[in-house]
Image (cartoon, coloured by chain):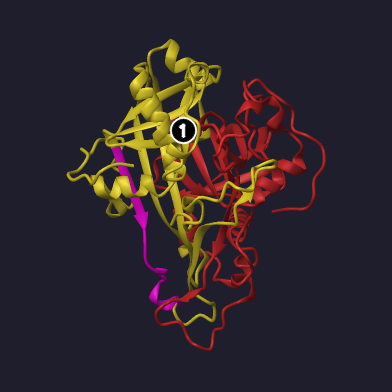
Chain colours: A red, B yellow
């Protein structure tokens, strides 16, 4: 999360889609809004020439994303050994199911961001601490300051990778179904079924002191 | 979606995690349940030696997954040209945010499935039609039969890839936070914040005949 930003990312052969080019966007405001509406990304990298895709958390500070993990995990280990790991980091939100009269024109309204780049280990202790705060606050804004910060042992056990937002694009579909005109009188229901993410009631941990009230940031609505 | 299944998938060096091995599972029942609880996957492949991760829909028939797209899209094109595309297909559901007293022990309860394999073009017209039905029904069970089936022109414009469930694993985290004993008296709220996906009210398409009622499958609750 960060201050507002303007301007656009530069298009590259890897960020311009082959299809539905009009659904793509490169401006910072759109890209950052989609990134900030989520906290789970799918991180792709190449292992032995084969693709690997793993879900993981991310945080954003300005034009930089952070992911983290145990120093023993494979991608973080590889990134540290090779001083960088080529990755593709993708974030997707589903907004609606799009039901057309024809099976062919069924679709999904979504927002996604795809980031290409080389993820590099964060070694500066100040940046590392800030990155970890950003990761926690990205999931639940305000939480980092309302928990015990990592100690030296925990910091040493945690690897953080930085990925700069340079080769990046957003893509989104909005609106209703695009049926062929000759299908519009067919007797099938057609339209949108909105999809959203919600938070349930907080469940206190076993042994939590009843005097510790649920903080306000828990009861804010779920992400869009 | 499919009939019930028993037995387990065989473990491989690509499906046994380096960390948290106890969170991994290989039995069909667990793997299929996670796959059937969603419809958006993140498909990873290698392009020019670089990883690419794109969101797309999927369907399941028994031990086989299907993805589809325009014959003009890059991964589908590549798969058809090379008679197969090495992929990693990952499906993730977030169930809860796990708030520990310490920042370090924050986590997420999730269920995920990771499938490694070579996605191959489906050329048999009967299997292709069944795969497309499975894709539509995976998003909204019952919808395929309640829409106009694809005609020959639409079938020709659509490429379908099959990915067999062979090298596959599930991974899940459940339960509350695992704080260090010495942190349990810290004055920070700790516990779970459940996360779920819900469907909103259906929005009829512009021009929909008011005599066409919203079918029952629209008003079923969202996926877990």
How far across and down, in percent of the image, does residue B38 sit? 43, 46
Residue sitting at the far top: B81
Quadrant where the C terminus of chain A sits is bottom right
How far across and down, in percent of the image, does residue A5 sit? 80, 45
- Horizontal side of A87 relative to A64 (left or right) equals left
Residue sitting at the far bottom: A211
Q: Residue B223 falls in which quadrant of the image?
A: bottom left
Q: Residue placed at 56% from the left, 62% from the top? A: A198
**In this orientation, which residue lies closer to the viewer: B18 or A204?**
A204
Tell me the magenta residue range.
B168-183
How far across and down, in percent of the image, does residue B177 sit? 42, 69
Q: Is residue B74 above or below residue A210?
A: above
Report if residue B216 is visible in the image.
yes
Q: Residue placed at 44% from the left, 10% from the top? A: B81
Q: Residue placed at 57% from the left, 31% from the top? A: A105
Quadrant where the N terminus of chain A sits is bottom right
Neighbor class of circle 1 (other Cα within 10 Å; few <14, some 14-19, many 20+) is: many
């Amino acid at each position: 999360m960060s201050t507002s930003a303007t301007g656009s990312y530069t298009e590259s052969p890897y960020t311009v889609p082959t299809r539905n080019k009009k659904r793509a966007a490169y401006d910072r405001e759109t890209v950052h809004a989609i990134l900030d509406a989520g906290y789970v990304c799918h991180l792709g990298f190449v292992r032995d020439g084969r693709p690997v895709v793993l879900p993981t958390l991310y945080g954003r500070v300005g034009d930089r994303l952070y992911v983290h993990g145990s120093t023993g995990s494979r991608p973080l280990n590889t990134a540290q050994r090779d001083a960088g790991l080529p990755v593709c980091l993708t974030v997707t939100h589903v907004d609606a199911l799009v039901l057309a009269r024809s099976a062919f024109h069924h679709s999904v309204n979504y927002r996604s961001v795809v980031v290409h780049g080389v993820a590099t280990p964060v070694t500066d202790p100040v940046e590392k601490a800030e990155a970890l705060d950003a990761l926690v606050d990205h999931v639940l804004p305000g939480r980092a300051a309302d928990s015990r910060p990592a100690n030296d042992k925990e910091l040493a056990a945690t690897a953080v990778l930085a990925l700069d937002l340079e080769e990046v694009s957003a893509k989104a579909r909005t609106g209703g179904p695009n049926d062929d005109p000759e299908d519009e009188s067919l007797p099938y229901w057609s339209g949108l079924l909105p999809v959203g993410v919600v938070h349930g009631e907080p469940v206190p941990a076993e042994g939590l002191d009843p005097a510790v009230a649920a903080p306000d940031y828990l009861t804010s609505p779920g992400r869009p």
